[in-house]
Amino acid sequence: MEKCNSCNVELTERGWTKFKCPDCGKTEVYRCKHCREIAAKYECRSCGFKGPN
């Protein structure tokens, strides 16, 4: 089971997403619905890119 990169919750509810890191394109970033809605920060585990801002 995948977990949110921001809050580490298991992604069981609808509304989560995954995408490649916008900087390195190597690592998949997983985001739960709540963290997406509040624009919580995440960090790429490969290159250290910090988003969403």
Image (spheres, helix red, strand yellow):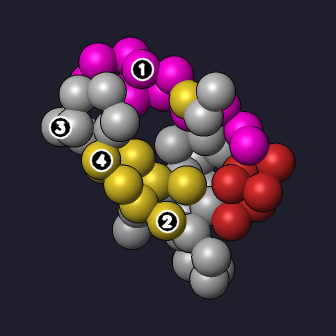
Q: Which residue is mark 1?
A: 49
Sequence order check, earlier mark of 1 and 3: 3
| Disc nearer the start of the sequence (1/2) | 2
Which residue is denoted by mark 3 in the rendering? 26
- In the orientation shown, which residue stands out farthest toward the left? 26
Q: Is mark 4 in CB contact (under 8 Å) with mark 3? A: yes
Label 4's element? strand
Mark 3: which secondary structure? loop
Q: Kindly identify the amino acid type of the residue bearing the numbered disc 4.
A: Lys
Q: Which callout, 2 or 3, points at the residue further toward the start of the chain?
A: 2
Quarter of the view holding residue 7: top right
The residue beneath circle 2 is 17
Element type where label 1 sits in the image: loop
Q: Amino acid at mark 2?
A: Thr
Please tell me how many numbered marks the rendered image carries. 4
**Label 4: which residue?**
20
Residue at left offset 39%, top offset 68%: 1
- Which stretch appears magenta? 39-50
Q: Quadrant of the C terminus?
A: top right
Taking the spot 40% from the left edge, 47% from the top edge, the residue there is: 29
- Mark 4 / mark 3, whichever is N-terminal: 4
20 vs 16, left or right, is left
Q: CA distance from mark 1 to mark 3?
A: 11 Å
Q: Earlier in the sequence, mark 1 or mark 4?
A: 4
Point 55% across, 55% down: residue: 31
| Labels 2 and 3 touching (C-beta < 8 A) | no
> Mark 1–mark 4 contact, CB under 8 Å?
no
Q: Are marks 1 and 2 in contact (CB under 8 Å)?
A: no
Q: Nearer the viewer, residue 47 or 25?
A: 25
Question: Which amino acid, by three-letter code, is at mark 1?
Answer: Phe
